[in-house]
Image: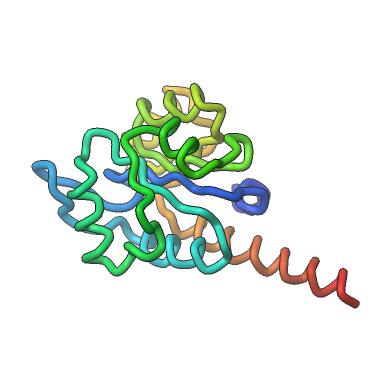
């Protein structure tokens, strides 16, 4: 799975995050606590130049923006908070095949498929993983830690390729 994640991340120009699940857990419409490894994953993706957006779905954009600001992540996303995948792609000028949707629900999987965007499911427990796999998700992780490791490995691989080309 790890090598597969590195390959997926390596060609990704934009990552679209679902809000409830991949970035945080919500309770009563408000962000309740951050998803482990989400903050360093977002910061690392931004640092290597990956375009980022949040697809908030039913969560109001002001709630998403307040959460991002409170976590110190607003600068990583800028104004890129959208209600749906298609809107995010259009606003970013992103190519679907060079984008990745990180989501936690079958609805996010369906939206990504409809838009032609590869999907990485995030299910924090066995039930959530089974739900996503049952909906047809090919790649599902229980933790964002291996995704963070894959981003770092892809960045090292790209840096090595760049160094080799300069030599």
Quarter of the C terminus within the rendering: bottom right
Residue 130 visible in the shown view? no
Looking at the image, residue 142 sits to the left or right of residue 163; the answer is: left
Q: Is residue 130 above or below residue 32?
A: above
Instruction: Kindly identify the residue that appears in the image at 49 percent across and 48 percent down.
Output: 15
Quarter of image, res 83: top left
Quarter of image, res 58: top left
Relative depth, front residue between 107 and 4: 107
Task: Specify the farthest residue to the right.
Answer: 167
Relative depth, front residue between 80 and 112: 80
Instruction: Kindly identify the residue that appears in the image at 30 percent across and 56 percent down.
Output: 35
Q: Position of residue 1 (x, y in %)?
A: 60, 47
Q: Position of residue 117 (x, y in %)?
A: 54, 33
Residue 99 visible in the shown view? yes
Q: Is residue 7 above or below residue 75?
A: above
Instruction: Kindly identify the residue that appears in the image at 55 percent across and 57 percent down.
Output: 50
Q: Position of residue 106 (x, y in %)?
A: 37, 27
Task: Specify the farthest residue to the bottom.
Answer: 167
Quarter of image, res 97: top right
Q: Position of residue 89 (x, y in %)?
A: 49, 37
Looking at the image, residue 148 sits to the left or right of residue 18; the answer is: right
């Amino acid at each position: 799975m790890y090598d597969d994640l590195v390959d997926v991340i390596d060609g990704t120009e934009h990552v679209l995050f679902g809000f409830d699940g991949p970035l945080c857990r919500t309770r009563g419409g408000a962000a309740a606590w951050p998803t482990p490894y989400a903050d360093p994953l977002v910061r690392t993706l931004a640092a290597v130049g990956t375009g980022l957006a949040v697809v908030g779905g039913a969560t109001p954009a002001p709630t998403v923006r307040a959460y991002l600001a409170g976590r110190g992540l607003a600068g990583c996303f800028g104004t890129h908070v959208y209600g749906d995948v298609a809107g995010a792609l259009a606003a970013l000028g992103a190519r679907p095949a060079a984008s990745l949707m990180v989501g936690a629900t079958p609805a996010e999987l369906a939206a990504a498929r409809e838009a032609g965007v590869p999907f990485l499911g995030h299910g924090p427990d066995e039930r959530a993983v089974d739900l996503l796999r049952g909906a047809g998700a090919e790649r599902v992780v229980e933790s964002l830690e291996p995704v963070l490791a894959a981003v770092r490995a892809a960045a090292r691989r790209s840096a090595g390729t760049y160094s080799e080309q300069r030599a």
